[in-house]
Image (cartoon, grey):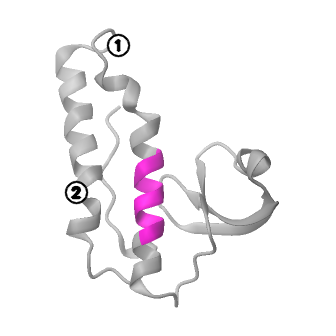
Amino acid sequence: MTKQYTVINTSTNAVLRHVTCLESDKEHNCAVGETIVEGILEPEQATDSVMDVLRAVRDDLLTSCDWTQVTDSPLTESKRAEWATYRTALRNLPSSNSSTTSIEDVTWPTEPS
């Protein structure tokens, strides 16, 4: 079964394009610096839809840096603390952007280097 997806730039969080594909093929539609979320995001959509996309992108970003918080990660304690702060900011995004009507208006936290 095919689904519709929105491809988003991971640096700017701008909507890049919409694709329709099998769920198993969705990652093949992303280049470096892009993420994909289920559904079609249009600027005129309701705030609830924007929040759904915000949460989906946020969840993908959290998942991609889960490894930073495990005790046997190669990070120093100070770097692990930086990543923990970043992850807290990601988790707080929905409440700090509750009135946002466009994904382009979200101020995303900066990923530690």
Q: Which residue is mark 2?
A: 92
For disc 2, the neighbor class at 10 Å (few under 14, some 14 to 19, many from 20) is few
Q: Which residue is mark 1?
A: 73
Amino acid on which the number 2 mark rests in the picture: Asn
Residue 30 in picture, x, y percent from top left: 70, 49
Q: CA distance from mark 1 to mark 2?
A: 24 Å
In the picture, the quarter occupied by the N terminus is bottom right
Instruction: Characterize the magenta stretch by its predominant secondary structure.
Output: helix
Of 10 and 6, the residue lying toward us: 6
User: What is the quadrant of residue 37 in the picture?
Assistant: bottom right
User: Which SS class for mark 2?
Assistant: helix
* Lower position in the chain sequence, tag 1 or tag 2: 1
Tell me residue 2's x, y (percent).
Answer: 81, 62
- Quadrant of the frame with the C terminus: top left
Toward the viewer: 34 or 39?
39
Q: Residues within 10 Å of mark 1 (few under 14, many from 20)?
A: few
Left/right placement of residue 92 relative to residue 59 reads left
Q: Is residue 29 left or right of residue 112?
A: right
Where 89 falls versus 100 (above or below)?
above
Q: Kindly identify the residue that appears in the image at 27 percent across and 52 percent down.
A: 91
Q: Secondary structure under badge 1?
A: loop
Residue ID at (44%, 76%)? 50
Tell me where residue 67 sits by quadrant: top left
- Position of residue 24 relative to residue 69, above or below, is below
Q: Is residue 11 above or below residue 46?
A: above
Q: Would you say residue 59 sits in the magenta stretch?
A: yes
Query: Residue at (76%, 45%) from the top-left corner?
Result: 24
Magenta residues (range): 52-60
For residue 50, above or below residue 63: below
**Residue 95: image x %, image y %?**
22, 67
